[in-house]
Amino acid sequence: MLFRRYRVWLALTLGLLMALTAHADVRKGAAGIHSWRIWSHIFTLASEEFEGRGSGTMGNELAAHYIAERFAEYGLKPIGTSRYHDLQAPMDGSGYFQPFRVYVGAEAGKANRLEAEVNGKRLSFKVREHFMPEAVATVGTAKGEPVFVGYGIHSSLAGHEDYAGLDVKGKVVVALEGAPPVTEGPNLLRAYQSARAKARIAKEQGAVALILVQKEDSPLPAVVAGRGADSGIPVVTLRRKAAESLLAACGVSLDELWQNPKGRPLGNAIVTVQTEVIQKYGATANIIGVVEGTDPKLKDEYIVIGAHMDHLGLGYQGGSLYSGKLPAIHYGADDNASGTAGLLELAQYFAANPPKRSLIFMAFSGEELGLLGSAHYTRNPIIPLEKIVAMLNMDMIGRLRDDQLSVIGADSSPAWRPLLEELNREADFNLSTSGGGFGGGSDHASFLARRIPVLFFFTGMHPEYHTPADRPETINAAGEARVVRFVARVAERVANSPERIAFSEPQAAPRRTGGPERGIRVYVGTIPDYSEDVKGLRISGAREGSPAQKAGLRSGDVIIRFGDQKVESIYDYMDALNRYKPGDTVKVVVLRDGKEVELTLTLEARSD
């Protein structure tokens, strides 16, 4: 507790010094870029008080107000609203917020029940203590005889058939969590280990409910983990000890099932599963301020300088890689308090040193949930997209090692590579540039999809990524200051250039990522629009030269069927991809301008 109070005192003290210095520097017209101020911003944003800045949470809102207050101190022009929670508020310039709605989690409702009648004996289990509904569970009740189905995987492509020889129509299936180990070759089974994938398979096989069994007995989360479209059947996870009692009543040993996971009926029993999951939504906002340019004509053109300010909160949002127990604050010092600190330094610097073109400073929310904030802006621009000359994005710039700086999107304009090479002669980074901009998986991709030149600055991955260990003490503030100065030089050159830089379509090679496509062997090249709450998968575009582009998919299309699978969400889409191999030809149905359009594409192999 004493240490926490010290952290609060130090953060407030540094914040006061920073504010006083900001005012003094702005008055002198000589605001610089300083490592101590970068560290102070990171220390504040990645403190316990901000609780990981999960989108839609109080910590996220605190971060938004902190950024807005800095923008006001530096003299940035507000172009949004002051009404953070008002999703319908006009962008009247009364404040720096652009609010939007995000999914913040789910909780178990009152109508959750798990009971069994086995040989005349009645067993009852308590929600939260013995079982929890999964996010993909439907609201409803199902009853049937229990059937053990191994790991609950059915895939000829992966060569694993847990349902072979079993009749599960009208039955409640019981499956082990996870997937069996793979000792040789690519692990195609990991794509089937989620509750979502197992629920889809169970429903397709005719089951009326799914019970997942823990391998190791551990407390269940207080909230429903993850997010998923309604699977159409009740789905629960049962603690190991509770599962042992249920299976023992059926005359079966859980240890034996783990050792020999062969499917079988579970005796004379009837199991009732009732689930109710309440999806929760909250408000969050992009924070946007403008530094007006000095040239009478060029100031009507803009360069966006952006960074996402959200992170994973207590670990329930956006793909935590933490192997410990949740909740646990995911501080997000590098991801992306570092980029946000860089954004604030640049805002202060350019407020005192405005270039010819105007600059839009955007702190995005919802990035960890699928680029939601940047996608929201590009669909609802306050300043028209045609006036945006370029977008510079900073994400994870706080861990510079051996002078290695990656810049992604270098082929989105013919101007980028010569400019980066020239400026790096003085900056002296071990600079790595790559052409494709979509592979970076950050907010620049939303602008690239709208044919705006982008650059994404990044100092590399590390073991602390998406864990609670991503803390301020791991940051190389001096190294980040060098990166931010480099970004400033790039912004100055583009903003002061007499001519607007041209856009060019990057040729992005398909690549394996750590995102939702992990484990998928085929490449399509669609660019999902995660922020659209529609039935189906809306896309914001197709990568140049990809199967999707060759087939004629385009921005705004909503994929509603992929092959023989109905698509109601991105999760259905990912499941559908797992059914195919490179070279397969697939019929895809999209909604385009309210009409169904059928297209044919040939799948390609994903590369590493």
Image (cartoon, rainbow, N blue to C red):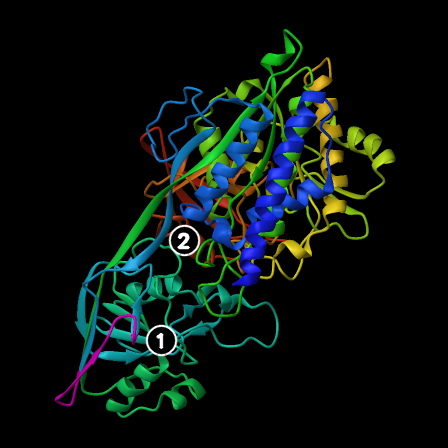
**Span shown in magenta:** 117-130
The residue most toward the top is 296
Q: Is residue 301 visible?
A: yes
In terms of depth relative to the viewer, which is nearer, 39 or 338? 39
Residue 485: percent from left, percent from top = 75, 34
Residue count near mark 2 (Cα–Cα under 10 Å), binned few <14, some 14–19, many ≥20: some
Residue 110: percent from left, percent from top = 19, 62
Residue 445: percent from left, percent from top = 57, 37
- Dividing the picture into quadrants, the one containing residue 444 is top right
Q: Residue at 41% across / 43% down in the picture?
A: 588
Q: Secondary structure at mark 1?
A: strand
Residue count near mark 1 (Cα–Cα under 10 Å), binned few <14, some 14–19, many ≥20: many
- Dividing the picture into quadrants, the one containing residue 196 is bottom left
Q: Is residue 467 visible?
A: no
Q: Residue at 73% across / 13% down in the picture?
A: 498
> Label 2 is placed on what type of residue?
Tyr
Q: Residue at 31% across / 82% down in the picture?
A: 243
Q: Which mark is residue 63?
A: none
Q: Secondary structure at mark 2?
A: helix
In the image, is 416 to the left or to the right of 159? right
Residue 463 among magenta residues: no
- Dividing the picture into quadrants, the one containing residue 184 is bottom right
Residue tagged by mark 2?
571
Q: Which mark is residue 175?
A: 1
In terms of depth relative to the viewer, which is nearer, 587 or 472? 472
The residue most toward the right is 425
In the image, is 530 to the left or to the right of 408? left
In the image, is 554 to the left or to the right of 596? right
> Label 1 is placed on what type of residue?
Ala
